[in-house]
Image: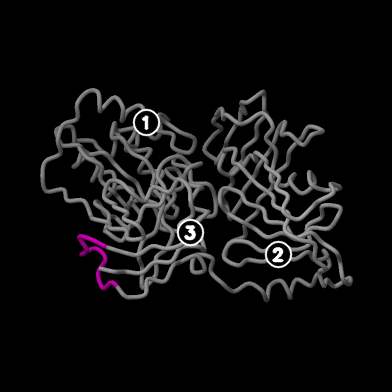
Amino acid sequence: MQPLRLETRAELAPDLALRRFRFEAGSGGLRFRAEGEKEGERLRAVLDSGSGPQTVEIRVPGRTTLSAAILPALAGRPLRPGERFAFDVFDPAALAAIPAEAEVLEREELALPGGPTPAWRLRLSLRGVSQTLWVDDAGELLRARGVLGLRLERASRQEPRERLDALVGEDWAELAAIPAGREIADPTALARLRVRIRGLPPGNLALHGGRQRLEGEVLTVERETLEEPPAALSPTARGALEQAFLRPEPFIQADHPRIREAAAEILRGAEGESELARARRLVRWVYEQIEKRPVLSLPDALATLERRRGDCNEHAVLLTALARAAGIPARVEVGLVYLRGRFYYHAWTLLHAGRWVTADAALGQMPADATHIRLVSGSLAQQADVAAVIGALALEILE
């Protein structure tokens, strides 16, 4: 069990457009802060995960607001069933602007402790994730039902703590996990996995390509083989990779002196080795040196290097940063991995060591076993697309 605190404060214009914000996330001894100010279609933000501030610029549409401002924006309007309202919403945790839509469903009467209360039932969709909300005419939220069937209901501050504590019991990782339908005795021995995958939303999931092939509902994953020597890249191809997968990003500080020093130390004496051998050294070091612990925070490579603990997200961003610092193109991937009869949401790294190779520093695998099913690949904003499928996917192992 871990306490988790999220807080967003913001200044909005009279039309509810975002002017400036401050976001904090804390869990245990970990803290993440982001604050920024919007100028035109650019938002300049300062981020701090406890390893020192870094400044980033984010492109956002001119009329961007916060998700918390959607209900006040609808308050007092003469709503009609079937009406839809579109918004651009800034997500401070993903550091990105995302489209949102509120749809008016119908008028209902809720049975609440204070008596029957008239309310509007709305459907709110953000990044493909839908919630059902019940709000009164003043725009106050009365009830909500969302991902994984989690429900919120308005209560007084005097609500007995014992009643709230009694509601705690499920592990969210278990709630989100997908039953496999059959056991896999040794996932590391698999050369290929075929599954039927249902419940895919329309969107930007990266299910097809590389070691994965999607045909209709059937997904085939083939583990990479590393027996042949990696082919040399042409200067043009190498330049394209460097442009996309060697540069630093927020939370992947590949150009930071401490990250570069760590990568150099890990690869000391490996000057004559192939990129594949050097990549293996990095994977092994992260696997052996980072303590395996669940962390509720935004994954940050530099903070992980200093604290030496984290879950799959921290392992993935640290390996990605070290690889980029060592001149090995890399990116983070997020998807599913098999464990004891279920597929759990998981993160790992894709490395270009002569060819693209899937590497899992949390499990110490390179290449990663064939039960690693990629859903998205790339930046933090792209990784957030996984939220749209949590609770919606069903898998059936075919072979």
> Element at badge 3?
loop
Tell me how far mark 1 sits from mark 2, CA to CA. Answer: 41 Å
Amino acid type, callout 2: Leu
Q: Which residue is mark 3?
A: 294
Give the x, y percent position of residue 103: 69, 52
Q: Which residue is mark 2?
A: 152
Q: Residue at x 82, y 33 (%)?
A: 14
| Most foreground residue, 167 or 364 | 167
Whichever of callouts 2 and 3 sits on the residue coming sooner in the sequence is: 2
| Most foreground residue, 270 or 100 | 100
Whichever of callouts 1 and 2 sits on the residue coming sooner in the sequence is: 2
The magenta span reads 184-193
For label 1, the crowd category at 10 Å Cα-Cα, with few meaning under 14, some 14 to 19 and many 20 or more, is: few
Amino acid type, callout 3: Pro
**Which of label 1 and label 3 is nearer to you?**
1
* Proximity of marks 1 and 3: CB atoms separated by less than 8 Å: no
Q: Residue at x 83, y 48 (%)?
A: 75
For label 2, the crowd category at 10 Å Cα-Cα, with few meaning under 14, some 14 to 19 and many 20 or more, is: few
Q: Which residue is mark 1?
A: 244
Tell me how far mark 2 sits from mark 3, CA to CA. Answer: 25 Å
* Proximity of marks 1 and 2: CB atoms separated by less than 8 Å: no
Above or below, comparing residue 294 to residue 70 in the picture = below
User: Hey, which quadrant is residue 54 in on the image?
Assistant: top right
